[in-house]
């Protein structure tokens, strides 16, 4: 009896110890699993875009993430023929980071890569006890040949505030192209010729630049290889006027105050706010509309037309100061970004050239306005109107009467504010009103290219 009882007690005691150890193990495993020390899931690798081609200096962006316990190692290799090259090795990532973004550059020529097939291998390992690992292989094509780009026509001279036309031809592998004017970039488009490899556009040269800047056409292929071609041209510096305009209480109360969204008592401060802040807001809307090129082919024919039987009142890029009660209003200066034409009161306004109406409505200091798109990034603006006879989407030509002049907005007298914008930037209308300029800069080169590349 005693022996049997002792044996039973020993078995019971061992059973309790085993159960206790089992519970402790389960708790420890649960804690380790909860903390990610023990984890069965592998890290994840994601790419901002699919990788199919490697050029001379390709940049690759990707993101690695691991929910728990976090990342430990990330490596990237490129394999081609007998070469196995390590592009990235990030070991012992501190504090078990959950997510990390990478951007690596591949200097293909320096690495000795050749044109042809290759493999990119991405490897990520987490910091769990199990050392979970993921490996992704991308089959890529190494392309070290830059695309071709030949200039077909470019401007011989450009003035500050002027515009130019460019036409050029690229190789079939080009996926991105355009023109850089100084630090500004503008789009060029194909589809205006039967040869889809021919691109063209109108581009602006800002009125506020007083010196010559580089004009460069570029093209990139699918592998990111880039070719550039600098345009040689003569820079004509134009000095624009700096007039002083007198304003009075009647103008401020009848024209300025209704345009303000603030209750400002001081007349000079009120004018400064409207002429600077409200003007900026209105011009941002104009720039936004005229930056959205939807018509590639040129719809315009010949020179653009001035308001009939009109004389010019205000010039393009005039830097205007304003005088109130004998004193200049400080901080109220503004550029006049179009030309003012006056004829009879409520004179009929014709579309300056063939195009499509893209905006009609009230534009603050510009009053009732119309914007017409003419193709190739060219737009015309008609402001201070009374009646408007067209709507958005209407096709118009030079004979179409679109509105009548008036004094809406910040206008001192009945006139038409006429503006030309190229890809969102104001340029001097005088060039577009000149038949010789349109013929030499656009019509003749355009026709020649049509004939040569049928």
Image (tube, helix red, strand yellow):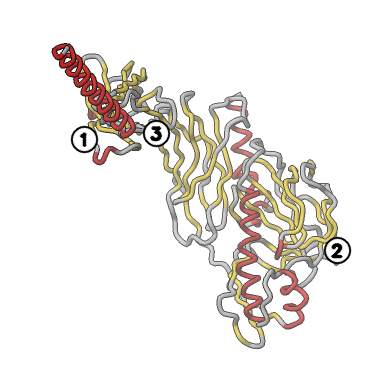
Outermost residue to the front = 1
Q: Which x, y percent locates residue 44?
A: 37, 27
Disc number lying in front (1 or 2): 1
Q: Residues within 10 Å of mark 2 (few under 14, many from 20)?
A: some
Which residue is rendered at x = 71% and y = 44% of the image?
302
Res. 108 in view: no
Kindly state the secondary structure of the residue where label 1 is placed.
loop
Q: Quadrant of residue 311?
A: bottom right
Q: Relative to 43, is 421 above or below?
A: below
Which residue occupies 49% across, 35% down? 177
Q: Which residue is mark 3?
A: 226
Mark 3 → mark 1, Cα distance in angstroms: 37 Å
Left or right position of 346 against 412: right
Q: Which of the two residues, 50 or 149, is positioned nearer the viewer here?
A: 50
**Mark 1 / mark 2, whichever is N-terminal:** 1
Q: Which mark is residue 372?
A: none
Q: Position of residue 212 (x, y in %)?
A: 44, 56
Alpha-carbon span between mark 1 and mark 2: 77 Å
Near mark 1 (Cα within 10 A), the count class, few <14, some 14-19 or many ≥20, is few
Image x and y of residue 366, in percent: 71, 62
Q: Is residue 77 left or right of residue 249?
A: left
Which badge, 3 or 2, is on the more N-terminal residue? 3
Whether residues under marks 1 and 2 lie with C-beta atoms below 8 angstroms apart, the answer is: no
382 left or right of 212 in image? right
Label of residue 346 in the image: 2
User: What is the C-alpha distance between the residues marked 3 and 2?
Assistant: 54 Å
Q: Nearer the viewer, residue 210 or 5?
A: 5
The residue that disc 1 covers is 92
Q: Is residue 94 above or below residue 329?
A: above
Q: Earlier in the sequence, mark 3 or mark 1?
A: 1
Where disc 3 sits, the SS reads strand
* Disc 2 secondary structure class: loop
């Amino acid at each position: 009896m005693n022996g049997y009882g002792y044996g039973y007690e020993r078995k019971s005691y061992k059973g309790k110890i085993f159960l206790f150890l089992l519970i402790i193990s389960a708790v420890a495993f649960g804690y380790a699993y909860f903390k990610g020390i023990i984890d069965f899931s592998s890290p994840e690798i994601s790419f901002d875009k699919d990788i199919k081609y490697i050029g001379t200096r390709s940049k690759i962006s990707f993101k690695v993430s691991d929910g728990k316990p976090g990342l430990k190692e990330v490596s990237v290799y490129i394999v081609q023929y007998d070469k196995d090259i390590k592009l990235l090795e990030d070991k012992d990532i501190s504090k078990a980071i959950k997510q990390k973004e990478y951007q690596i550059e591949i200097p293909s020529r320096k690495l000795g890569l050749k044109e042809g097939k290759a493999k990119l291998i991405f490897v990520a390992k987490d910091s769990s006890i199990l050392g979970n690992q993921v490996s992704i292989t991308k089959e890529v094509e190494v392309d070290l040949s830059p695309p071709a780009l030949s200039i077909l026509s470019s401007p011989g001279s450009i003035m500050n505030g002027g515009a130019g036309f460019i036409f050029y031809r690229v190789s079939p592998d080009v996926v991105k192209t355009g023109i850089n004017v100084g630090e500004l970039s503008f789009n060029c488009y194909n589809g205006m010729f039967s040869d889809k490899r021919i691109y063209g556009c109108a581009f602006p040269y800002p009125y506020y630049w007083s010196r010559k800047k580089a004009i460069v056409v570029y093209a990139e292929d699918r592998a990111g290889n880039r070719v550039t071609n600098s345009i040689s041209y003569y820079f004509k510096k134009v000095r624009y006027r700096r007039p002083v305009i007198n304003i009075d209480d009647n103008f401020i109360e009848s024209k300025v105050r209704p345009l303000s969204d603030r209750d400002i008592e001081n007349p000079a401060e009120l004018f400064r706010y409207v002429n600077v802040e409200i003007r900026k807001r209105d011009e941002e809307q104009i720039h936004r509309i005229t930056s959205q090129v939807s018509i590639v082919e040129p719809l315009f024919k010949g020179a653009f037309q001035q308001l009939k039987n009109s004389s010019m009142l205000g010039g393009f890029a005039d830097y205007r100061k304003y005088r109130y009660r004998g004193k200049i209003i400080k901080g109220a200066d503004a550029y006049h970004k179009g030309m003012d034409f006056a004829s009879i009161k409520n004179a009929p306004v014709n579309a300056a050239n063939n195009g499509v109406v893209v905006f009609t409505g009230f534009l603050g200091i510009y009053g009732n306005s119309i914007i017409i798109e003419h193709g190739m990034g060219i737009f015309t603006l008609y402001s201070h109107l009374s009646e408007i006879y067209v709507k958005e989407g209407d096709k118009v030509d030079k004979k179409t009467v679109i509105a009548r002049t008036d004094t809406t907005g910040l206008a001192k007298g009945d006139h038409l504010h006429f503006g030309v914008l190229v890809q969102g930037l104001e340029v001097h209308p005088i060039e577009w009103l000149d038949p010789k300029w349109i013929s030499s800069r656009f019509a003749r080169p355009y026709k020649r290219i049509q004939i040569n590349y049928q």
